[in-house]
Amino acid sequence: MFDAEQLKQAVGDLDEDKVMEILREFVATNPSQEEAQQAVAACQSGMAIVGDLFEKEEYFVGDLIFAGELLTNAIEILKPVLGTASSAKIGKIVLGTVAGDLHDIGKNIFKSMAEAAGFEVFDLGIDQPPANFVNKVREVKPEIVGMSGVLTLALESMKDTVDALKEAGLRDSIKIIIGGNPVTKEACEQIGADAFTTNAAEGVKICQGWVK
Amino acid sequence: MTDIAALAQERTQIIADVLAGRIPKRVPVIPGITYEFAVEYAGLDLMTATWNPENFEPVCDKVCQDFYADVFPVIHLRFPALYKTLGAKNWVMGSQGFLQHPEVVGLLEEEYDEFIENPYNCIMEKVLPRIYKNLDTDPQTRSIVMAKAFYIFNEEFGNIGATAAKLSQKYGYGTANLFTAAPSAPFDFVADQLRGFRNMMLDVRRIPDKVEAAVKAATPLMIKMGWPATPLPNAAVFMPLHMAPFMREKDFARLYYPTFKETVEAFAKAGRQTLLFVEVDWMRYLDYLYDLPENTIMWFEFGDPKLVKEKLGKKHILTGFYPVTLLKTGTVQQCIDKAKEMLDILAPGGRYYFNFDKSPLTLDTVKPENLKAVLEYVAQNANY
């Protein structure tokens, strides 16, 4: 077995060498699927520490990117012992960068942190027209839709996407969060979203609040 | 002297005053309106109109007629014909026709040493063919692609220069060029064009020594890129800053700041000011910005204008802060009130010209009547 607290802390510290060392030793003991799930859970708790430190401005966007990479690599090491067991999901998010905008770094950070928090994320990709959001929402019936954008022109596309979801009769069954450089409270109101953030960690907390 | 010539002279004078740190007669209004906005404002289609240089003059003329500015206000930096010819992966058109910079990797991790050893050769041999797919071919074809690309580049810039001069005469704009060249801070160059945003952030943690050496190796190239070959009045090198707000201060202090400072200092020593676009939030780094050469022009996006005025306002030239998104969400009165608030904070003592926190990108990013009202308000209500 492994020391869950130690693993969680090593992820929180973004100590890549230590995380990998703990996990390699753990995998070498040929653990059960259940134990492997506990290791995943410890890594995910470590991500929550990363999110907190980001909100306290001790970590920055570069650290969130590194944390996402660290978590991906950690799960990769655990894969052979994880088997088919999958942890319960706390909700579904349909996520994408809106039409006209090709930026995805912020979206990818949010995705990685939302997955670590237990969400199943359906990532549409960049430059996604409203119809693609509508179709995916119909198909997977998420609790939440996340729209991302960096350029100011994304605000208009976000509004178009919300309008399309309304027209499709899907708006009332979902919560909508918008994120990225240009979003503000006023823009959020005009777009008709439920929440906005320029901070991925805060965005994940808002989503957690919605599925409680 | 004609009224237009007198107006141009007055405008040139207030810009000269502000850039030299003297209190001008009034706050200069120097907005940057993107060509993409101008195209849509003139009723043309962004997808097709930016390919044809002949559209430039009538499109700009419409903006000059309708929006107040003390300097020719249209900024045209993104040329689809150029990037199409090169097969660019670093400048790509979005589905609505706006060219933008997606994440690219021009240099692989295992190529760091090659870049550090000889950055110019490495860029020519490895990076360019990777970022511009039409250069990834035999040397004969590549030289033809390059020749075509530079023909377009020269044609576009020649047209912009001639049109700006013509419209400046027509509208009595002041003489100034704050975009004589557009180099990056060396760290940003390595991040944006070579390693990509994501890889760079991983490299900073995993192989900081390589990053440091690569950034140092890129510095002479950035200085050369922005070098002021000919003296010009009221001129600045434009440097948009990118990665610093996403970094830890200790990484910034070691990997970003020293070569950034070296680059700005090199231009200052050669007699050219630098206009920094201080993107995102730099409030953590104000002491570093303070240490740059006197009269560096700093165009702020986010942050606390009061604090910046207090800390930097006696040494440097400030602009920005006005949230351009308000021009979309606010009423005319709210937009004017915000302009008044910015003037009250930033204008006292000079060393400030009016601009927004960033340029309106496309027509749907602002209400044109708000943009118009704010520029008029500042032009008429910011006398010293």
Image (cartoon, grey):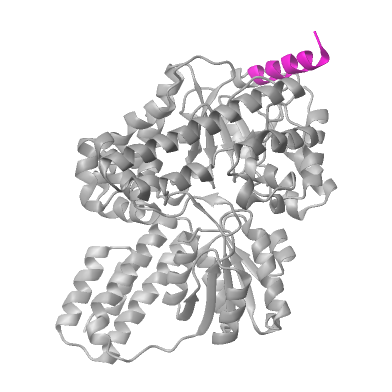
For this view, does B231 lie left or right of residue B141? right
User: Which residue is at a point 81% across and 45% down the rendered structure image?
Assistant: B369
User: Residue A85 magenta-drawn?
Assistant: no
> Is residue B152 depicted above or below A189 in this figure?
above
Q: Residue furthest top?
A: B1
Which residue is more in the foreground, A132 or A121? Answer: A132
> Is residue B97 depicted above or below B216 in this figure?
below
Which residue is more in the foreground, B222 or B307? Answer: B222
User: Residue B8 magenta-drawn?
Assistant: yes
Q: Quadrant of the N terminus of chain A?
A: bottom left
User: Which residue is at a point 49% across and 35% down the rendered structure image?
Assistant: B152
The x and y percentages for residue A196 are 63, 65
The x and y percentages for residue A94 are 54, 77
Locate residue B16: give its quadrant: top right
Q: Quadrant of the C terminus of chain A?
A: bottom right
Q: Is residue B74 visible?
A: yes
The magenta-colored residue range is B1-17
Q: Residue furthest right?
A: B333
User: Which residue is at a point 78% across and 17% down the rendered structure image?
Assistant: B7
User: Which residue is at a point 52% across and 50% down the rendered structure image?
Assistant: B100
For this view, does B183 lie left or right of residue B15? left
